[in-house]
Image (spheres, helix red, strand yellow):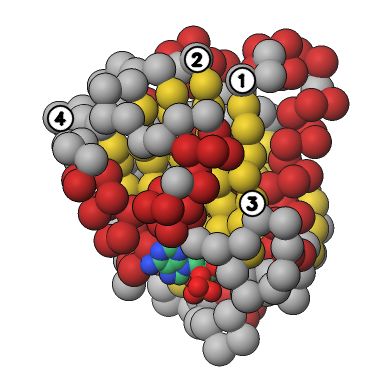
Amino acid sequence: MPNERPKAYRGVAFLKVTSVKHYTDKTFSFTCKRPDAFRFRSGEFAMLGLENGDKPLLRAYSIASPNWAEELEFYSIKVADGPLTSRLQSIQIDDEIVIRPKPVGTLVHDALISGKRLLLFSTGTGIAPFASTIRDPETYEKFEQVVLTQTCRDVNELAYGNALIDEIKNDGLLSEVVGGRLSYIGTTTREKSDNMGRMTDWLKDGRFAVATGSPLNPETDRVMICGSVAMLKDHKQICEDAGMDEGSNSEPGQFVIEKAFVD
Ligand code: A2P
């Protein structure tokens, strides 16, 4: 008889880690092999974590890899006293992570009505779901322009986003699909850089309009937002002030936020 695991492990899958990359002392990404039956829509998250005695220790993690890739990629913060990330940050190739293979979420095309420009607003590791969305050909079938923004405290935290854009540029197939219609604006708030300040302030004071060519337009712009509770609240307010309605899987709208990461 194989070793019986406690009941709480029913329905979860164990996946081998295939790569780990540390970006900063606060962030890292890792990949694992994707089971054949594991399907997801770009922007969705899954419950992921580590084996932990009677019950796996799981948290909501956006899937950062595109939905056509053979591997699943995740981008995580490191919290020194975080129950999961304090352990997860030291995973190595061939270690196993635990995942509930039932991805869900609202940062998906299905939750937005059609539009011309897709705006993806993120802070910190909130860029993860959009790393998937911007590598999905469907995104470029649905939208003429895609703008990804990420606000971080320090310059080195923008390395993941910059690497992602470089990867797309260097991928023959993907760069053809994207065809110059994707732009990435990384801003910092604590360390000096060329683009300083919160994107919420950029939207309010006109810097967003200058950088992207036009201000937020409820007629043609569709918005996805991912970040901290305070960030979600402020971006949501800006969308609502512009006359936009929040969408969901059952009732698509003009903007969507992901509440799964709200503690
Ligand atoms: P700031 O440095 O001005 O607080 P955190 O690590 O606290 O989650 O923040 C990540 C990034 O998100 C920081 O650059 C931070 O800016 C920014 N940020 C925090 N709160 C908000 C908010 N309410 N709206 C927009 N950006 C925010």
In the rendered image, the quadrant that contains the C terminus is bottom left
Q: Earlier in the sequence, mark 2 or mark 3?
A: 2
x 24%, y 54%: residue: 237
Q: Nearer the viewer, mark 4 or mark 1?
A: 1
The quarter of the picture where residue 175 lies is: top right
x 28%, y 37%: residue: 255
Which type of secondary structure does the marked residue at label 3 adopt?
A: strand
In the rendered image, the quadrant that contains the N terminus is bottom right
Residue that badge 1 annotates: 181
Residue that badge 3 annotates: 186
Asked if 19 appears above or below 181 in the picture, the reply is below
* Mark pair 2, 3: CA separation: 21 Å
Q: Name the amino acid type tagged 3.
A: Gly
Q: Earlier in the sequence, mark 1 or mark 3?
A: 1
Residue that badge 2 annotates: 144
Residue that badge 4 annotates: 251
Image x and y of residue 130, in percent: 53, 40
* Mark pair 4, 2: CA separation: 23 Å
